[in-house]
Amino acid sequence: MNTEALIKKIENQISSFETKVDVTEYGIVQAIGDGIARVSGLANCKASEMIEFENGAIGVALNLEEDTVGIIVLGDYLSIKEGDKAKRTGEILSIPVGNDIIGRVVDPLAKPIDGKGGIKTDTNQLMERVAPGVMTREPVSVPMQTGIKVIDALVPVGRGQRELIIGDRQTCKTAIAIDTILNQKGQNMKCVYVAIGQKKSKVMRAVKALEEAGAMDYTTVVLAGASDSSSLQYIAPYAGVAIAEYFLDKGEDVLVVYDDLTKHAAAYREISLLLRRPPGREAYPGDVFYLHSRLLERACRLNEENGGGSITALPIIETQGGDVSAYIPTNVISITDGQIFLESGLFNKGIRPAINVGLSVSRVGGAAQTKAMKKTAGPMKLGLAQYRELESFAQFGSDLDPQTKAALDHGSKSIELLKQDQFSPIEMTKQVGSIYALNNDLLKDIDITKVAEWEKSFYSFLDASKSAVLEEIKKGWTKEAEASLREAIVEFNDTFSA
Amino acid sequence: MINSRTLAHTVLKLSEQQDAENRIDAFFSYLSENNLTGLLPQMLDHVLRLQAQSSERETLHIHSRYNLNEEEISSIRKVTGAIEAEVSTHVDESVIGGFSATYNDHIYDGSLAHQLVTLKNVLTR
């Protein structure tokens, strides 16, 4: 646009600008402390309405009481004084969102905190929105590849699913989420990573890993760190899903990671106690279930008439001493469509990702699994269950029948094959190749210590000389595809053994 | 838990009701029966503060760049609906032009400063 046109546009805006007396309702701050303000007046204030304080800080009305309104302050509350004015804005809590938010690190109010300048936005997205209704939804049927063999094979996740990642501290819960984001490159998926109550250094490490892998081209990070107020931590996941819904409304597929909801529940407990809401079990307020259910219900897959987009949610929960029967873990387990259970025992044994296959489940992901993966990985879960049973017997006696020995050998090789390094997601077609080899006794001559080496070389072999086979598997699982894959494995095994 | 703030709110509500005198007497008897008379000094502070806030709320405060004449004040009264309220005028340079008034829990902002901020928001949106 040239300067003259710009000047004309500004003149038009000025001439069409109407001057009128602006009427706003205000209240007086009666008490302020720990990020919670009690304001008298504001008789017509709505629930979740944004309130502006004299120092420019924004708050959200959470408790509408007889004489006062309980407000959580989303910013600097230290300079708010008793007697200050608090104005109604008439707007329900929302954040500005636009396409440019991709690749940025923002706070829960969508303000950039990565030092890369402002973000051009084109709409305001409500933080609290009712989840899509039944008639607008479609069953989960499209896979969301995580690139992690054990997940894609045994606990598959579909687009629009809510799959919980649960485990003790230091069991690589975040690593699974980050690997999943890395694997979305070229999969036509936007990603939102919401860090709640995390150390900022840890989040910056994750952002750096995403940047290095080029994953920030399709990812937004929402950060409410451990040093941020509990009010900001409380709204962070809702900000994340609001950003996701912006892309959902455009018919796109989005993956949202909530890391983690244990800290989110703790932040909400803090706010609720400060607002003097009655405490319940473990001092959480009565509506802590609704806190997470209304968030996770917003994950969905819409039908074609409604745009056909999807939001896949990967909430993370941290357990204490592997106890999944605590209050928040049981709540979130019951809300989600399955869980990936990580065990510190497995982690310490060197089985990484430390996923307990017996306790992990995906209730709807099976329908979204590709035919190739379903056919090849189908017998694996049963084989691993048998292996776990036989493993305990094997400790007592050395005289085992050949069948048991074979089952043990197969099980231990399965475990070895399912091991995977961090930041190294594997394409679905290659996963199918290695799992097919395992389940069709094509690894029986490979020593267990050589399985990792075999796998690595096999993938290189496929890339170098059998890309046509990979393409064939990608198109579908046919007899011809199976035959070519078998042929490729046999050919590779000959060279590998030699 | 009963605290001095709750008691102050209660006594003010009682004072607005019919038969206020008897009700307030009953209120004081309740305090002495329940050993709550120790809260009376704090309660009085709250009552005075709430009363000051209430009269503040019912006063029409006008902020303008210069002293307003009777005609201008009367038109502001009409805009705000504060026909019979007490008026307190303040000269405030930050207003730049026009006026800003507060009355009965509402801010009536017709100041040039506010309009410039609104225009800035329109232009930078």
Image: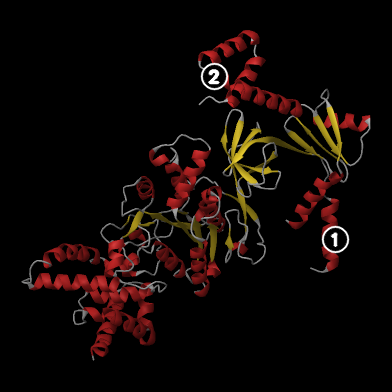
Q: Find numbered disc 1 in the image and state the secondary structure of the residue it sits on.
A: helix
**Residue that mark 2 sits on:** B36
| Residue A165 visible, this angle | yes
Q: How is the image coloured?
A: secondary structure
Query: In the rendered picture of this protein, how many numbered marks are placed on residues?
Result: 2
Label 2 vs label 1, nearer the camera: 2
Instruction: Say which quarter of the image contains residue B98.
Output: top right
Residue drawn at point x = 75 percent, y = 25 percent: B55
**Residue that mark 1 sits on:** A8
Q: Quadrant of the C terminus of chain A?
A: bottom left
Residue drawn at point x = 40 percent, y = 66 percent: A146
Residue A242, how many percent across, how many down?
Answer: 55, 53
Q: Amino acid at mark 1?
A: Lys
* C-alpha gap between disc 2 and disc 1: 71 Å
Q: Please give the chain letter of the residue carrying mark 2.
A: B
Q: Please give the chain letter of the residue carrying mark 1.
A: A
Residue drawn at point x = 64 percent, y = 67 percent: A116
Side of A12 relative to A126 (left or right) = right
Residue B109, how many percent across, how many down?
Answer: 80, 40
